[in-house]
Image: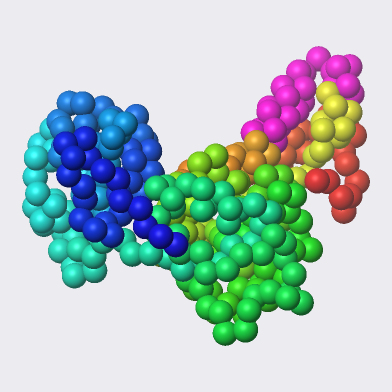
Amino acid sequence: MTKQTEHAQDGRSTAPGEVTYRSGVAARLAGLPVETLRVWERRYDLSETRRSAHGQRLYTASQVQRLGLLKQLVDQGHPIGQLAHLSIDELRTLGGADQAGDSAPPGPIDVVVIGPGLARRIGASPRDTALLNVLDSCPRLDMSAFPRPGLHADVLLVELAELDEGAIPMIAATSKALQAAATVVLYRFCSNATIRALRSQGWLVARVPSEMGELIPLCRQALEGQRLPARHAEQLPPAQRFDEESLANLTAASSKLACECPRHMAELLLMIGSFERYSQQCASRNTMDAQLHLDLGHAAGRARAILETALERLARAEGLPLPLKGANVS
């Protein structure tokens, strides 16, 4: 893919072949909210960036790297005001990141793209996707004619609008044929069960991003192994024992009792179960906060299990109806 150089307002340009990024893409690459970057620039003028002919700030790879170091150090508790004018070497020393690998600017990523129009959209956003080198593309998963023999890629990038588990074998076969170091799967609609099945393959799974510049951080996260850690079965919350119908039956039956505890506990379980499912859906929105929302969902699941045990004990004591043992509650 051809790398395009932005021209500065003063008539000068960046070095030949040097890749630059607009503020939004630079912020995403550095792991910053773009609003935070704008505040930092306004208050501290911290990057000495050039501007495009349209007045947009342009960041080089080394400047993006510096922003990433600033973000890490601020997360560790260092005030941005004390960091803003330190050199990149001083920031590395402060953060203990003085290894040789840390000084290398991000290089291009060889990708093979599967999905209707995805390669075209990447090509139409050269400033946002300059580091994505598209080796080949195919509008759909089709092992009979794709990929080409001998083709290898850093990342297999797959976009399927409606994703189901039937695609897993074909994605796995394509990734193996390409000897891809990582696989990124993008979707618009997908069940939580399918997302878990995809992630169990070691793939990075996320919703189709609204901007093409977000593809670079996703690919880098996949290559660097920044995926959700595998969950062992013993760490998962127990299966649900009371569905909404069972809780409604308990609530109705408890209306004949003087004690209102069964009704209150059933209402609590309805709320916690709803939040548990909501957190599972949140975990699939993007990779940045996926682990947090997955942990929230598991915490809600453990709380649900404790309350279910208490409710079962209370229901037995009061002679209230309980769901049949072994019933399939989902």
Along the line of sight, which residue is nearer the eye, 227 or 4? 4
Confirm whether residue 19 shows in the render.
yes
Task: Write the residue at 23% across / 65% down.
Answer: 104
Residue 318 placement: quadrant? top right
**Is any atom of residue 199 visible in this view?**
no
Residue 158 appears in which quarter of the rendering? bottom right
Q: As rendered, which of 301 and 11 lies closer to the eye?
A: 11
- Quadrant including the N terminus: bottom left
Colouring: rainbow
- Apparent side of residue 262 relative to residue 102 in the rendered image (left or right): right
Give the overall secondary structure of the magenta segment.
Answer: helix
Residue under the point 21% across and 35% down: 9
Is 80 located above or below residue 88 in the figure?
Answer: above
Instruction: Locate residue 166, reporting x and y percent.
Output: 79, 63
**Across the whole image, how many numbered discs are drawn on residues?**
0
Q: Position of residue 38 (x, y in %)?
A: 28, 30
- Asked if the magenta segment contains residue 261, the reply would be yes
Left or right, 124 with respect to 95, comes to right
Q: Residue furthest front?
A: 11
Q: Is residue 263 shown above or below 218?
A: above
Q: Is residue 1 magenta?
A: no
Q: Which residues are magenta?
A: 252-275
Q: Residue at horizontal 61%, vertical 73%?
A: 175
Q: Could you say where residue 66 lies in the image, as x and y percent from the top left?
A: 21, 49
Q: Residue furthest bottom?
A: 150
Left of 310 or right of it: where is 88?
A: left
The residue at the point 25 percent across, 50 percent down is 60
Q: Position of residue 280 (x, y in %)?
A: 63, 43
In front here: 309 or 33?
Answer: 33
